[in-house]
């Protein structure tokens, strides 16, 4: 890394130092989104509380370390571990810039033995990885059990492991610590295009139960065993930690049965959308005429139940799971606009991002083909923001903007991965022409153009 770093302000009220290079994934995403692209970022901010102790293994530039510290008001003891010297140097700059005095940075790799190991460097430092063989000119490799013992760390509330495919080796070298403590562990399951559950299996053997993230607001639910194509991380914890997190509304230990909302409740859910209220009576009649055992009605009913304020975590998780299954069945039976919109919204809320993106794209394609929009269609907005927004041009423009925005937000983690698509479709301009001004998406388009050397 050469040149002075860029300091980028991020969501949560902190600043991060990063390479002055738009080819760096972290730098690009921070400038593009003002945040990290993982859904887990919002959950970690909810998780943070004063006095917590955390481990960030494979901290890279320190996003999760800094986000935790900021969300805890600086009152958190965090050990960030990063093997790449120039990356760790940037993390030190961020710690100083934010005045976080209780972050300790250890410059080493973590694995299943002590020694040295080769470090493979990439243009984007978050893709740096360690090898498998001992090498005299590599970076220091340590077992986590030894690192924490040297620092007198005897408790931990949260641990993040992101080491590009070596997660299971980290866990193998942390057996004593994981047996004597009870952290919530967030660990990566993707290494490039490869998905692996090796680390998950090791944690299960150590009496940790597996969880996955659901959204709106973010909460952990028991891992279903089925991986969404865009799922990057899983979580694991012991029973005592799960109980504590459930009491905070952050985790459901099981899926509880819950009664779905009735037709009136379904109509109330749909008619939260201001754009539909002009046809409220017709929409309510159409919903009332839908049999209760129709998968579409079941999906709306259970989603409305999950959305009720104050629903206990297990009941909310159970209702969301049933809503997702029913919405998928409804689309298989009849893939019309109403069912596709519901499937997209519910899938995204259930944490199935790839499924949600596919449904949103299907709505977009149907609109391009000129599909008719019936006035009494019960359209569940794919994005919550569209509940309060109405398009000047009417329902078709409302749906058009929503399907375009949802596809843009969900189909790729960043426009860095699809720069030509981000620019050639003129998506920001199209949204603006429909009356939808979305500053963060306009920023994304302009950054993609800047990186490609094109006028924006």
Image: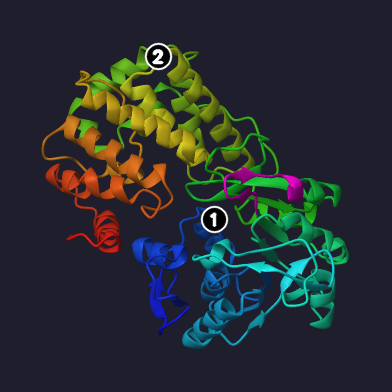
Q: How is the rendered protein coloured?
A: rainbow
The magenta stretch spans residue 312: no
Quarter assignment of residue 87? bottom right
Residue range of the region highlighted in magenta in the rendering: 188-200
For label 2, count other residues whose C-alpha is less than 10 Å away and answer few (under 14), some (14-19) or many (20+): few
Crowd around label 1: few <14 · some 14–19 · many ≥20 (10 Å): many
Q: Which quadrant is home to the C terminus?
A: bottom left
Instruction: Find numbered disc 2 in the image and state the secondary structure of the residue it sits on.
Output: loop
231 to 9, vertically: above or below: above
Mark sitting earlier along the chain (1/2): 1
Q: Is residue 219 above or below residue 122?
A: above
Q: CA distance from mark 1 to mark 2?
A: 33 Å
Frontmost residue, 123 versus 208:
123
SS label for mark 1: helix
Relative height, residue 36 to residue 283 (above, below): below
- Out of 432 and 420, give the one closest to the viewer: 420
Q: Is residue 199 magenta?
A: yes
In the image: residue 159, left or right of residue 371: right
Residue where numbered disc 2 is placed = 334
Q: In this image, 373 relative to 60: left or right?
A: left
**Toward the viewer: 387 or 338?**
338
Q: Is residue 74 visible?
A: no
| Image x and y of residue 237, in percent | 74, 54
Q: Is residue 297 visible?
A: yes
**Quadrant in the rendering for residue 122:** bottom right
Task: From the image, tell me which residue sits under label 1.
Answer: 40
Residue occupying image coordinates x 56% and y 67%: 64
In this rendering, the answer to whether 47 lies above or below 52 is: above
Give residue 127's position: percent from left, percent from top: 56, 61
Q: Residue at x 59, y 88 (%)?
A: 101
Residue 146: x and y in percent read 84, 75
Q: Which residue is situated farthest in the front direction here?
A: 136
């Amino acid at each position: 890394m050469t040149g002075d770093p860029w300091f980028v302000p991020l969501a949560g009220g902190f600043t991060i130092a990063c390479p002055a290079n738009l080819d760096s994934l972290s730098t690009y995403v921070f400038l593009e989104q003002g945040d990290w692209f993982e859904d887990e970022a919002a959950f970690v901010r909810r998780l943070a509380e004063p006095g917590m102790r955390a481990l960030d293994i494979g901290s890279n530039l320190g996003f999760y370390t800094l986000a935790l510290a900021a969300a805890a008001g600086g009152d958190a003891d965090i050990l960030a571990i990063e093997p790449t010297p120039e990356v760790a140097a940037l993390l030190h700059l961020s710690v100083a810039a934010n005045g976080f005095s209780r972050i300790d940075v250890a410059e080493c790799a973590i694995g299943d033995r002590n020694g040295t190991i080769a470090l493979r460097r990439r243009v984007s430092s978050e893709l740096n990885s360690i090898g498998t063989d001992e090498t005299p000119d590599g970076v220091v490799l340590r077992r986590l059990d030894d690192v924490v013992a040297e620092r007198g760390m005897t408790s931990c509330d949260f641990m993040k492991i992101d080491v590009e495919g070596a997660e299971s080796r980290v866990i193998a070298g942390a057996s004593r610590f994981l047996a004597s403590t009870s952290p919530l562990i967030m660990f990566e399951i993707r290494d490039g295009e490869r998905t692996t559950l090796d680390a998950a299996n090791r944690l299960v053997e150590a009496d940790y139960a597996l969880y996955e993230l659901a959204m709106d607001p973010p909460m952990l639910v028991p891992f279903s065993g089925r991986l969404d194509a865009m799922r990057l991380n899983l979580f694991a914890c012991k029973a005592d930690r799960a109980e504590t997190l459930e009491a905070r509304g952050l985790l459901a230990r099981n899926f509880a049965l819950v009664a779905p909302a009735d037709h009136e409740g379904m109509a109330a859910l749909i008619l939260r959308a201001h754009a539909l209220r002009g046809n409220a009576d017709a929409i309510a009649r159409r919903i009332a005429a839908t049999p209760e055992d129709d998968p579409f009605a079941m999906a709306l009913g259970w989603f409305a139940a999950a959305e009720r304020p104050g629903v206990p975590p297990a009941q909310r998780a159970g209702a969301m799971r049933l809503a997702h299954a029913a919405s998928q069945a409804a689309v298989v039976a009849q893939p019309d606009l109403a069912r596709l919109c519901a499937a997209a919204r519910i899938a995204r809320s259930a944490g199935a991002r790839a499924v949600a993106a596919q449904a949103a794209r299907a709505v977009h394609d149907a609109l391009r083909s000129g599909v008719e929009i019936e006035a009494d269609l019960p359209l569940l907005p794919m994005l919550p923001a569209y509940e309060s927004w109405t398009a000047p041009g009417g329902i078709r423009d409302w749906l058009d903007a929503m399907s375009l925005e949802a596809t843009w937000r969900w189909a790729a983690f960043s426009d860095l991965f699809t720069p030509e698509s981000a620019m050639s479709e003129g998506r920001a301009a199209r949204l603006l022409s429909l009356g939808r001004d979305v500053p963060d998406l306009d920023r994304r388009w302009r950054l993609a153009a800047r990186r490609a050397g094109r006028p924006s």
